[in-house]
Image (spheres, coloured by chain):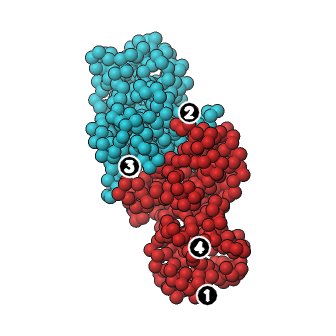
Chain colours: A red, B cyan
Amino acid sequence: MNASPHVAVVGATGAVGIEMIQTLERRGFPVSRLTLLASARSAGKTLPFRGQPVKVQELTKESFAGVDLALFSAGGSISREFAPAAVAAGTVVVDNSSAFRMDPAVPLVVPEINGADVRAHRGIIANPNCTTAITLMALYPLHAAFGCTRIFASSYQAVSGTGAKAIAELERQVHQIVRGEPVTREVYPHQIAFNVLPHVDAFLPSGYTKEEMKMENEGRKIMHHPSFRASVTCVRVPVYRAHSVAVSAEFERPVTVAAARAVLANAPGLDVVDDPAHAAYPLPLYQAEKDNCAVGRLRQDCALDNGLCFWVSGDQLLKGAALNAVQIAEVLLKPGA
Amino acid sequence: MNASPHVAVVGATGAVGIEMIQTLERRGFPVSRLTLLASARSAGKTLPFRGQPVKVQELTKESFAGVDLALFSAGGSISREFAPAAVAAGTVVVDNSSAFRMDPAVPLVVPEINGADVRAHRGIIANPNCTTAITLMALYPLHAAFGCTRIFASSYQAVSGTGAKAIAELERQVHQIVRGEPVTREVYPHQIAFNVLPHVDAFLPSGYTKEEMKMENEGRKIMHHPSFRASVTCVRVPVYRAHSVAVSAEFERPVTVAAARAVLANAPGLDVVDDPAHAAYPLPLYQAEKDNCAVGRLRQDCALDNGLCFWVSGDQLLKGAALNAVQIAEVLLKPGA
């Protein structure tokens, strides 16, 4: 990889795209040139980068000439259609969609966990599902120490995980309710304001949603742990930003709260926020716009013999998407990657 | 019990007390006379019953002369102080607080599950924790059919579970945010609007909250199942009314989704709402003010061999409190109870 790469952001005007641009700037990523790509509808808009406006261009298969690195976040169908064209043009793609995550030829990477897997890429590196990435930031260090066999997890997912239109939907519904107007829906199948929806992503014939199965499938690949089992319920909640997950984890070896706390205190990208006596535990409201995830509510699991309960929150636009993608790009810049 | 009892509601002006009065009326409970009791601060207010205003009186130890049945919902310390005085006056107490639930001399009853336990009362019958009652409405029929060994559960609890002041707090915070004003807090230790709090009830030295342990402790007593294990995370969410719970349940005997669905379809007080293809699953917004609880999202558990995942929602002011208390009173009226 060119040490000062020409970077493209695909889906630049979306909730994640905007975070990608800001994250590149904030972390001082050595961008020599920034190309912003989006649908024809968004072409011509400008977005700021390092204090300068950058015009958004329409994404075409010819957009990638001279581009060293492309960060994709425009949905699976756009990735499937345009990532191969980017790779053919010599661009390395970091893809935030689910399109290539389970492709054996594509590394699926959380840099703190399996950054070395980046080296095996053949043009595309996949960024994991947001809820999976946030959960693994706390689970993987525990797995490395105690050997995780399975988890039971329930999520509390923010509307920004669905995108900018869902943020607007929650805002609009709240205003409608405050004004006593009828509530309208465009994004979610039911009102999200003052409600919770046990429905994230599409349903599979098994009754699980695709989102729920990502924890087990992507978790196995990222942790190199093919027998990992995960029973997950994914729930959308009326929170703007940052996902939270309640986890019961079973381990091969005995685990105490003190030993788990010591492991988590040394884990990269993770803060331990766990002082119930002072009402200190991770909260999505406080994790918004933070790079680090936070873990707390550590306790011995009541229903597992070698088990631990914990609660993890993280900004799913950052660690669950833009930050993780830029961290993968940072690994690509290292010699030998 | 007198077939047309003189009924007192203790804590009549609270969120649950108001529901108790309405539930007595709505179900045609044969009240011969209604006495409303509350703190001195609320005395003199009037509340409607069968179209007539009833004046609220100050609760004292002399309030129970001639009262056949008292429904208490004014918190544990009021129950501990005044329920013995009521019993001494010959009143049968149905207590919604946690004060007597684990007392071996006090039946703890969900009428659909262990209604016969009412008969053993010595003056006090306890009403269970709201999240426990709602979860057991779906879990107990499955336990009866397949033998439940343990559950992993995460709750999504409405603010009305905390009381009328918490409803006002969420409303006030939403208005403050819509108007761009600073957010103020009186009830919860952190903002509840657009946030979720993994903190319901007080923390124990183990790191669990009292609320989280009620599922295992009360579940064992109600189901007559002393080895039942429950690993629970209780979370407050910005929903006004109706709690939801995501459950992974392990059974002694094999369970299929079809067999579970057949059992649940015949369970009393429970609706099966489970048609993902049409985005049909239990939602707290739709369960508000409904007597029945609803169960859906049925699926084979990914991380348990004889396991089932499900999602249950119910109005915690009704099945979790006022309705269950009135149902206990209905059992008391039956001959032989």
The C terminus of chain A sits in image quarter: bottom right
Looking at the rendered image, the disc whose residue lies closer to the viewer, 1 or 4, is 4
Helix, strand or loop at mark 4: loop
Looking at the rendered image, the disc whose residue lies closer to the viewer, 2 or 4, is 4
Q: CA distance from mark 2 to mark 3?
A: 29 Å
Which residue in the structure is indicated by mark 4?
A121
The circle drawn on residue B299 is: 3
Amino acid of disc 3: Arg
* Residue at x 38% of width, y 49% of height: B299
* Residue at x 48% of width, y 42% of height: B153
Q: Is residue A15 above or below residue B137?
A: below
Helix, strand or loop at mark 3: strand
Which residue in the structure is indicated by mark 2?
B210
Q: Chain of mark 3?
A: B
Q: Chain of mark 4?
A: A
How crowded pointer 1 is (Cα within 10 Å; few <14, some 14-19, many 20+) is rated as few
